[in-house]
Image (cartoon, rainbow, N blue to C red):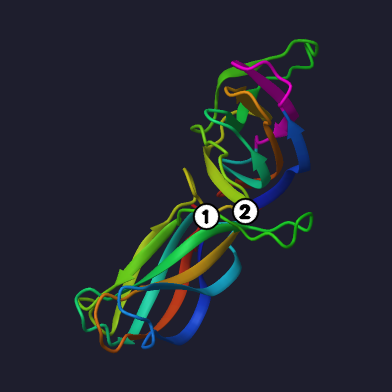
Amino acid sequence: MAGILIPILPKRSFDFSSTTVGTAQHLVLVERIDISQYIDGILAVRVHSLTLNGADILELDLFGDGYSGQDPSMDFVTTSNLFPDMLLNSAPGLFTYGGTVLGQFVRLVLSAFHATAGTMSATLSADLVLRSPDPSR
Amino acid sequence: MSGRLLPAIPKRTLDFATLASGATQEVILADRVPLLHWRELTLIVRVHSHTLLSSANTIIILVYPQSWTSEDPDIQFVTTSAAGGVTLGPATPSPTILNCPVATVGYFSIAALARITALASRQSAGVMQAALSLEFSSKDA
């Protein structure tokens, strides 16, 4: 038995209604999540409520985080997310997705593409489940 | 590498005799089954007996990823797609055992909890009963 559950995102509301239509916004919600002792990671995203219009897109992703004490002011981050995209498009709803987690740290990023004028908001919470074959973890 | 057999549902008889033709019904067999620790999961369904006689009548046992939070305890957070499932039909031997992998990575994979349901679909008249018990074979390889 070698799994842990990290409640990485408490219930929180986001409102992208005032962002410019046709633009994307990326919010770093959590940094330096230590995944170094685990092999598999699963994101469990709870969508408590959601308002999207047209082609609006909302995603919650993990990216590799390369924080280094040798250059702490630099923002080292992978260019692509760890897991395939999962569109958060219904509420209330649960979205689980994951796979192998490589490296030492990851960060949690919320991406919103405001495609259609109007309200774009969501209330989300999320857990990260990490698993390892090492029973001592 | 280690493994464990996790009992999920003791022997139970499901009876869909009153289900109307052309209808489906999904019942919850177990809720919030803890599966946090396991990197590999197999659903094991023991079919003790069944009376699925018509070719179009089926019972599908499904395992859904589930979550719960005290921040919104009234909402049932369950994914729209199952992480695994097995189908019983008239061709299913009795007794027998049915296995299927339960996703622990990828889309709609098990995080910490699971809900187990039985989805009955009736297309023609007749008795429709099954005695089942369920377990998970779990490994952390």
Q: Is residue B3 left or right of residue A44?
A: left
Q: Nearer the viewer, residue B79 or B39?
A: B79
**In the displayed structure, does residue A71 sit left or right of residue B83?**
right
Q: Is residue B61 above or below residue A63?
A: below
Host chain of mark 1: B
What x and y, as percent, mark residue A96? 55, 46
Q: Which residue is mark 1?
A: B140
Q: Residues within 10 Å of mark 1 (few under 14, many from 20)?
A: many
Q: Nearer the viewer, residue B69 or B122?
A: B122
Q: What numbered label is drawn on residue B22?
A: none
Q: Is residue A124 above or below residue B18?
A: above
Neighbour tally class for label 2: few under 14, some 14-19, many 20 plus, Cα within 10 Å: some
Q: Secondary structure at mark 1?
A: loop
Residue at image coords 52%, 55%: B140
Amino acid carrying label 1: it is Asp
Mark 2 and mark 1 residues within 8 Å of each other at the beta carbon: yes
Magenta stretch encompasses residue A23? yes
Number of numbered discs overlaid on the protein picture: 2
Is residue A137 in sight in this rendering? no
Name the one closer to the observer, A43 or B138: A43
Q: Is residue A129 left or right of residue A75?
A: left
Visible in this render: residue A91? yes
List x then y, in percent, for residue A32.
Answer: 74, 28
Q: x and y percent of residue B97 in the render?
A: 32, 76
The residue at 47%/44% (across/down) is B107
Element at label 2: loop
Q: Which residues are magenta?
A: A16-36
- Residue at screen point 58% across, 52% down: B111
**For mark 2, what is the residue?**
A2
Give amino acid for label 2. Answer: Ala
